[in-house]
Amino acid sequence: MSDTDTKNRTSKLDNIKAEFPELNRVINSKPVVFLDSAATSQKPMRVIDKLVEYYSNYNANVHRGVYSLSMESTEEYDTARELVREFINARSTNEIIYTRGTTEAINLLARSWGDANIGKDDEIILTELEHHSNLVPWQMLSQRTGCKLRFIPVDDFAVLLIDEYKKLLSEKTKLVAFNGQSNSMGTLNPIKEITALAHDVGALVLVDGAQYVPHNKVDVRDLDVDFLAFSGHKMCGPTGIGILYGREKLLDEMPPFLGGGDMIDTVHYEYSTYTGLPIKFEAGTPNIAGAIVLGEAIRFLNDLGMENIRKHEYELTAYTMQKLQQIPKIKIYGTTDLRQRGGAISFEYEGIHPHDLAQILDSESICIRAGHHCTQPLMRKFGIAATSRASFYIYNTREDVDRLMEGLAKADQIFGL
């Protein structure tokens, strides 16, 4: 990429907030500041327009009709799958399975691959950082099969202890499943190192990429992961659509997860045979609109450049950490090493419950998350019930952070601290 291209993309990123209609809203006489992108991202107008375009111009089922509307819908739907493939550098669209989101993708894997390959003497390694979506499905598999779950511990800064991970690995290890970035602590995990160590003992690797894929350039071949799950709604796309990437050989060997229309080859009263990848795992009428609009979201992110997105969030996180560290009553959770954390900051304001703080900030039209962030075991480990969390994306600015600081000062005044 030329210097001119880089400057153009960076300039576009700096002025991008206007493209997100919800960020132009005024609530309580103040412009909205959205700092909860780890929960879901805002959508640019071109993505919203794509949804309207589908329902207005070629709303028809895919892979079924020979009429023009159906063929146009199918072409857009299949093009979106190719866009996903390119976005993560998968080898084939057969490796791209549409799901409802990260949660369904992990459950699909636990039910299909897990039930077929895991027994009572096997072990699955997770981490203490996991979102419930990458914990509960494996607990359920353990209950069905008797397999054992092991956990990579974290230090006081929510960083994985890799030496302890090495001790957990053995010939019993069949799968290592972990998030690329912690949704609650912001920790960026060393995907390639964890994966290489797992492969050394013959284990497969699943990365929960819900928080990682929207913010970083991803190359599944370079990372060498076996499975990757992520969601469209956290990367400027719609809700209800997600992706399970898997190596084609592994997916081909897995039994179907759901039965019904489209995933079949031939059906008899007594038995059925199944079609090939990727449709084998996509029974019934899919989320056609969601897939097509996810494709548009990927085009949008590609236009900005994932390297630019990561750089923007790195700088914004550094600025926010610096500001928060100037407030004596605030405790920041997670590492201070910005090379090891993404754009999500959990913190505690001494004397103010996170829910109270969130309500005060809401009165200033500032949106943050308060709670356990679907990581109850991790919160318990750190001896806390909840934290306040500010999380960033491409549309956030230093002015947003300054508004957050003003809101925190107001909370301090209200509580008389």
Image (cartoon, helix red, strand yellow):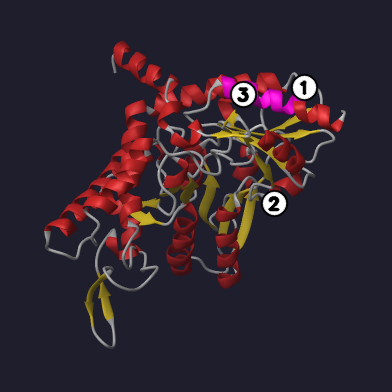
Q: Residue at x 34, y 33 (%)?
A: 300
What's the distance in space between the residues labelled 1 and 3, CA to CA?
A: 14 Å
Q: Nearer the viewer, residue 37 or 339?
A: 37
Q: Nearer the viewer, mark 1 or mark 3?
A: 3
User: Is 349 in the magenta?
Assistant: no
Of the residues shown, which amino acid type is indicated by label 3? Val
Q: Residue at x 26, y 68 (%)?
A: 262
Q: Which residue is mark 1?
A: 327
Name the spot of residue 306 as percent of width and height, x first: 40, 29
Q: Residue furthest bottom?
A: 270
Q: For the stretch drawn in magenta, what is the main secondary structure?
A: helix
Q: Which residue is mark 2?
A: 376
Of the residues shown, which amino acid type is indicated by label 1? Ile
* Left or right: 151 in relation to 197: right
What's the distance in space between the residues labelled 3 and 2, CA to CA?
A: 27 Å
Do the numbered discs 3 and 2 sit on residues whose CB atoms are within 8 Å?
A: no
